[in-house]
Image: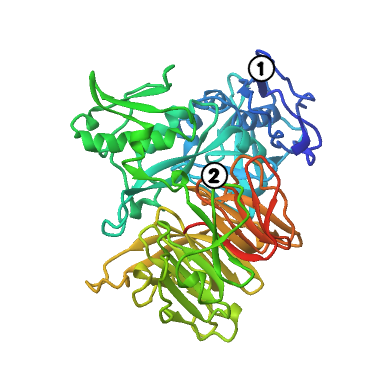
């Protein structure tokens, strides 16, 4: 313990104890004693521990010094104390009543440093501290993660009781503050699932399930907390485009803790707000629960909902897939790319085949392409010509003719014309025109209607270089270039009133937020899950790197993809069972699970899965 405390002069640790599940309860005291006075250099976060480590807080001992109170409180914030009861013992009763730890969590790069504002040898019953650090992220009252930067400075005040002569904190920091490694040990990202409110006038076979990631405490009954979080409803960012089937006010019965039984079935007792739902609505509720909880317990395969003593409904994981579609479980039939003649070809996606065949139709025969996209049902394809000027769309059927371009860019060169296209779940086609004189984000309904401009947020800085729409159809990933910097931004798609024109003119993108704030340059990206993307980019003064990122800007658990040199393009399926595929200096290569990169063909470019 102590790798993340390099900046601290010493380790102050009487406020923490840890229990290791693998070897029973083992209490760890601090590595050095706490001085009764003097400078408190820093209260840094512990290194990220193995999954079996549990950390428990220790209350203040009798006659604890003010520095021990400060350290003990900050250490208690990083423990597995369910309701922060031990942390509250470091506060005065009045401060405890006003302190709301669940309203916000501030994540710092190395944990909070704590510096007394005044120190003297004279006896004093009042002392102020300043907590400092470098912001990394915040988690708000909705449990929603957001990257942050800049300096952190927060005041904290201590007072000594005139009767008991015990130091306590009477002005605590707002919410919870901890270092990044403690946050990674304490918190777990969970995708809650809601239903898209607009699925394109019934063009999709089922409602789309949309992932809404939040962070719950890893060792504090995460199953129950994930359910409570789901019932509270979607985050404000996602709320305009999704719905929940749970009636407003639905909650768990008081004090219920949820655990699947030995048959992998979870019984969820709800309050009276859900007592009168119909069977169809109840099955939707159960599907939301199953999709959400399979993040935490993949073996869970049945949910039963109850209100009072009455069963409302039950649903198996298999039946849930008939209620809503998730991109992460919809497997593509083929991988597509351009061969050495710049024609569109394909390989069976779930095989080790290395012999591609031309796609049926004109895009596999009659036109040279620089980029392409295939609809999610794999019935249609779109391609941008080799010079980036023209967009062609055609059916993937034998003998399909090549029509006139659906769109033409007036940009001065290939890199300043049309981006690679992308299909959404409704069968509409998206593309960015990178013409410096008229940069636009465009939508073609069903891929063949007249292109209409998608409204983007006012003040969007830079030019959209590439676009990828999520399988749920309500989120879009954009690479936006502004000067020398290019960023990956995630936006919410809203399909509003188009005045009855039916031309898609009511489509707009809202509230763009960065998914890669630490990258100076993003060169390639693709959706790689319901709330995850794979990104190729470079940090400032760094080398090219490939990593997974969450839509909220956090880093998902698990290893990054194996290193690959000279990556120019990348594609992934939302279905994690299919390999990552890239175009690099070695040609078209793929990364099967648990293996190293394997070459498919030497001469090929622009690999894509459907979408």
**Tag 1 residue:** 22
Task: Tell me the tag on residue 44.
Answer: none
Q: Please name the residue shown 41% across and 71% down the image.
A: 399
**Tag 2 residue:** 576
The mark tally for this picture is: 2
The N terminus is located in which quarter?
A: top right
Label 1 packing within 10 angstroms: few (<14), some (14-19), many (20+):
few
In the depicted structure, whether residue 548 falls above or below residue 14: below
Name the foreground residue: 583 vs 536: 583
- Residue 544 position, x and y percent, is 72, 59
- Residue 191 position, x and y percent, is 46, 41
204 horizontally vs 131: left or right: left
Whole-Å distance between the Cαs marked 1 and 2?
A: 30 Å
Sequence-earlier tag: 1 or 2: 1
Image quarter of residue 37: top right
The residue at the far front in this view is: 399
Q: Is residue 360 visible?
A: yes
Label 2 packing within 10 angstroms: few (<14), some (14-19), many (20+):
some
- Residue 357 position, x and y percent, is 55, 61
Image quarter of residue 203: bottom left
Name the foreground residue: 86 vs 149: 149
Tell whether label 2 touches label 1 (CB within 8 Å).
Answer: no
The residue at the far top in this view is: 24
325 horizontally vs 48: left or right: left
Report the colour scheme.
rainbow
- Residue 492 position, x and y percent, is 42, 59
Image quarter of residue 323: top left
Q: Is residue 455 visible?
A: no
Front position among marks 1 and 2: 2
| Element under disc 2 | loop
| Element under disc 1 | loop
């Amino acid at each position: 313990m102590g790798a993340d405390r390099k900046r601290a002069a010493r380790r102050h640790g009487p406020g923490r104890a840890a229990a290791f599940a693998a070897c029973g309860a083992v209490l760890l005291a601090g590595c050095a004693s706490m001085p009764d006075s003097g400078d408190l250099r820093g209260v840094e976060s512990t290194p990220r521990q193995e999954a079996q480590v549990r950390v428990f807080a220790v209350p203040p001992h009798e006659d604890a010094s003010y520095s021990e109170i400060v350290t003990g409180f900050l250490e208690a914030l990083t423990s597995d104390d369910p309701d922060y009861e031990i942390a509250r013992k470091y506060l005065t009763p009045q401060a405890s009543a006003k302190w709301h730890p669940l309203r916000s969590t501030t994540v710092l790069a190395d944990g909070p440093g704590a510096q007394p504002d005044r120190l003297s040898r004279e006896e004093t019953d009042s002392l102020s501290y300043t907590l400092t650090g470098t912001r990394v992220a915040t988690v708000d009252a909705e449990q929603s993660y957001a990257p942050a930067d800049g300096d952190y400075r927060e005041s904290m005040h201590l007072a000594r009781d005139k009767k008991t002569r015990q130091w306590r904190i009477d002005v605590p920091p707002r919410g919870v503050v901890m270092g990044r490694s403690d946050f990674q040990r304490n918190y777990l990202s969970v995708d809650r699932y809601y239903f898209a409110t607009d699925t394109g006038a019934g063009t999709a076979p089922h409602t789309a399930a949309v992932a809404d990631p939040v962070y719950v405490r890893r060792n504090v009954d995460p199953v129950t907390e994930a359910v409570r979080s789901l019932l509270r409803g979607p985050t404000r960012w996602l709320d305009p485009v999704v719905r929940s089937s749970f009636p407003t006010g639905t909650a768990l019965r008081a004090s219920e803790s949820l655990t699947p039984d030995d048959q992998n079935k979870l019984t969820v007792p709800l309050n009276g707000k859900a007592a009168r739902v119909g069977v169809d609505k109840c099955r939707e509720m159960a599907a939301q629960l199953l999709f959400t909880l399979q993040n935490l317990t993949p073996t869970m395969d049945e949910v039963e909902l109850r209100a009072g003593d009455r069963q409302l409904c039950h649903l198996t994981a298999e039946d849930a897939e008939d209620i809503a579609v998730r991109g992460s479980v919809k497997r593509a039939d083929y991988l597509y790319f351009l061969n050495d003649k710049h024609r569109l070809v394909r390989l069976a996606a779930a095989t080790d085949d290395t012999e591609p065949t031309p796609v049926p139709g004109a895009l596999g025969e009659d036109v040279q392409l620089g980029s392409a996209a295939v609809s999610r049902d794999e019935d249609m394809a779109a391609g941008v010509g080799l010079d980036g000027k023209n967009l062609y769309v055609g059916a993937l059927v034998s003998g399909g003719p090549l029509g006139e371009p659906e769109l033409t860019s007036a940009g001065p060169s290939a890199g300043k014309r049309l981006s690679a296209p992308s299909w959404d779940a409704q069968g509409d086609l998206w593309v960015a025109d990178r013409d410096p004189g008229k940069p636009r984000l465009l939508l073609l309904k069903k891929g063949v209607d007249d292109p209409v401009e998608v409204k983007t947020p006012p003040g969007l800085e830079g030019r959209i270089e590439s676009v990828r729409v999520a399988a749920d159809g309500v989120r879009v990933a954009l690479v936006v270039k502004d000067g020398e910097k290019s960023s990956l931004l995630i936006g919410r798609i809203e399909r509003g009133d188009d005045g009855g024109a039916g031309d898609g003119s009511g489509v707009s993108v809202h509230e763009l937020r960065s998914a890669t704030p630490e990258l100076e340059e993003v060169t390639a990206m693709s959706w790689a899950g319901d709330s995850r993307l794979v990104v190729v980019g470079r940090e400032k003064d760094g080398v090219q790197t490939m990593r997974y990122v969450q839509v909220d800007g956090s880093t998902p658990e698990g290893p990054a993809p194996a290193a690959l040199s000279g990556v120019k393009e990348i594609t992934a399926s939302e279905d994690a069972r299919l390999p990552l595929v890239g175009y690099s200096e070695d040609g078209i290569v793929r990364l099967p699970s648990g293996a190293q990169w394997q070459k498919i063909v030497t001469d090929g470019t622009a690999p894509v899965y459907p979408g």
